[in-house]
Image (tube, rainbow, N blue to C red):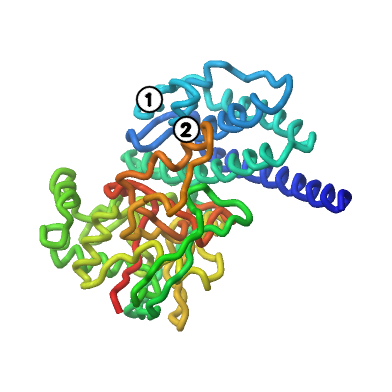
Amino acid sequence: MEVAQRSRSATRDDELALLYRTVRYSSRNLGTPLSDADATVQSMPDASPAKWHLAHTTWFFETIVLAPHLAGYCRFDESFDFLFNSYYESIGPRQPRARRGMLTRPTLETIYAYRNHVDAGMEKLLERNPPIAVRDLVELGCHHEQQHQELLLTDILHLFAQNPTRPAYKLPGPVALDTSVAAPPKYKAFAGSIVEIGHCGEAFAFDCEGPRHKVILPPFELADRLVTNAEWLEFVADGGYENPLLWLSDGWARVRAEVWTAPLYWARENDEYWTMTLRGFVPVDRAAPVTHVSYFEADAFATWAGRRLPTEAEWELAAQTQSLTGNFADSGLLQPAAAAASGDKLRQMFGDVWEWTRSAFLPYPGFRPPAGAIGEYNGKFMSGQYVLRGGSCVTPPGHIRTTYRNFFPPEIRWQFSGLRLAQDA
């Protein structure tokens, strides 16, 4: 029995070391197209510079894993505790989020040296067969860094969209637009039942994904695909952004205050809508899923269409029989793609765009945040946010799960967020 346990432990150590190296390499690869200036500028308070993402994820491993668990470890630079802490109040003070773009120093080159220093320490730690609790922290750190890989891309897109030259982050070749007209969505029916949702406790999950629990669901129907840009153009043409009867009060206040007339990054030129993407400024692909819309916009569109947004429990029930495949970051497309040909199955449940649900981000029954700084990871944000499901075209492969709960305030638009319609049966 002891031999078998050591064998399983060794296997997991090997897998964890591979996960760590793969994630860290992927982050560095994301930074390759960026200049020091690209990686330093902050385009708005909600976004962070790419340099900060690369450093903060490294700070997490150094502060949460190495400093307390690797004897003799020497910190790269004590000032980084202040510069690259994100929101961990229990750890100490930090650079204000809205002023992360003021960090012209350290340079991007120094940040890469910092990453190399921490990676060397992590290799030593992983070679020493750390206890399960430490391995769990390393695994959490890897998934945390994958979240920041996605944020790095969304933040770079927002930054480049402010540049009048509209630069492309990645342009390996032209992307052909799908000029076909998508057939109207089909609605898959689900009978009313008592269902179980939430993570079952096996393999990795963030704390907010559990505990698994029962939910009573009345009968409902879910659209077999995401809402497209062509459908959103109909909403715009029908005065969707001009009709207060379609909007929640706070949403309508945003429409007027910020002069929303279309999704973020859309611009009308020569009687045609164009949009900013990670591949530069391109015509809006009418067959592709609409993206960069807020919860307020998604809810208004659903009202206009005579439908509603699904709850997260409805979405998870529908997703439980779907394979975890889709248009993720590894496709290289880095933008949503048109749905595959229609069939009897749900399409685009994973990848392309995060799907807004009508569910507030609240704790599941029995939820308790972990002790210590890790307890600040999700629990303290369970106020004023809505749940999104399914991942997007910039989500790292292997990072998504059926139970994954993303969350953002209802007004945010810079994320790759879209929607799928639902209706009562």
- Which residue lies under the disc numbered 2? 39
Going by the picture, which residue comes out furthest to the front? 366
Q: Single out the mark in the foreground, 1 or 2.
A: 1
Say left or right for 324 vs 256: right
The label on residue 188 is none
The front one of 311 and 54 is 311
The front one of 192 and 277 is 192
Q: Write down the quadrant of residue 268 in the picture.
A: bottom left
Q: Is residue 401 visible?
A: yes
Going by the picture, which residue comes out furthest to the top? 78
At a point 31% along the width and 40% down the height, the residue shown is 164
- Which residue lies under the disc numbered 1? 96
Question: Does residue 69 lie above or below 21 as drawn?
Answer: above
In the rendered image, residue 40, in percent from the top left (x then y), is placed at 44, 29
How much space separates mark 1 and mark 2, taking CA atoms? 18 Å
Q: Is residue 166 visible?
A: no
